[in-house]
Amino acid sequence: MSVMTPVSQSTATQNRGRESAAEKVGAPGVNRREFLTYAWGTALALISAEGGLATYMFMMPRFRAGEFGGMFDWGPAQSLPDVGNSPQNSPDGRYWLYHSEQGVKAIYQVCTHLGCLYKWSESTNRFECPCHGSKFTADGDYIEGPAPRSLDQFVVEIVENGQVVAQTTEGETAILPPQTTNPNAEIHIQTGKKILGKPANTSPARAITQAFAKKIT
Ligand code: FES
């Protein structure tokens, strides 16, 4: 059985005092355990906030509606040009809108050869590039010239009651435009979603032109 002398009692009291002081950090009433708990909580909250912000930024569209790279709202289907009419220029969206028998097309205005801006020629009823003479049909199909493929297209969406019910898709041999019979359906053009034109040697317009040229020679 040990007996505490006045000296050892004093040492024990001093040790308890030191432990107590070591647990107190900074503000009165906050001990070390509480301080560490708060620090961990704050760090976790910051990490969660950063993660949430990153997810939010990722989910947010990078371009606003009506800005190239974002969505362009053409309006209701009843405002589309009649089927077969000349393509309509949308300079802000950098596309030609063409209402073909197959559906609605938004054709990118940049030539697939070296990137010049081609024009619609009313007299020849086709797109013609002033740089090296590539030519394309109103559908965007390659006819002739050094361009390696038909014209690229943006995805067109048919929207009903806020839902996309049809959209441009990439077929094996052609880009397939969406159609609608609902005059109130909204037409959206997604200029951030581009589908590359098909290779020139698979273009139906090229085959027709070559067959015609053979006939007259
Ligand atoms: S850039 Fe159009 S034909 Fe060369």
Image: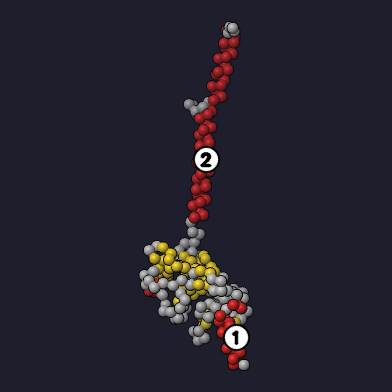
Drawn side of residue 187 relative to residue 131, left or right: left
Which residue does the image show at 53% across and 68% down from the upper left? 194
* Residue 206 or residue 94, whichever sits in front: 206
Res. 203 visible in picture: yes
**Looking at the image, which is closer to me, 163 or 43?**
163
Vertical position of residue 10 compared to residue 132: above or below: above
Which numbered disc covers residue 76? none
Amino acid at dot 2? Leu
Q: How is the image coloured?
A: secondary structure
At horizontal 61% and vertical 81% (from top left) the residue drawn is: 145
Q: Answer above or below: position of 14 versus 118.
A: above
Q: Are marks 2 and 1 in contact (CB under 8 Å)?
A: no
At 59% across and 13% down in the image, what residue appears?
11
Q: Which is nearer the eye, 17 or 199?
A: 199
From the top left corner, tell me how far across and down residue 2 is, in percent: 59, 7
Q: CA distance from mark 2 to mark 1?
A: 68 Å
Q: What SS does tag 1 mark? A: helix
Assign a secondary structure to mark 2: helix
Question: Which residue is identified by label 2?
Answer: 44
Residue under label 1, please give it: 210
In the orientation shown, which residue stands out farthest toward the left?
184
- In the rendered view, would you say 70 is above or below 121? above
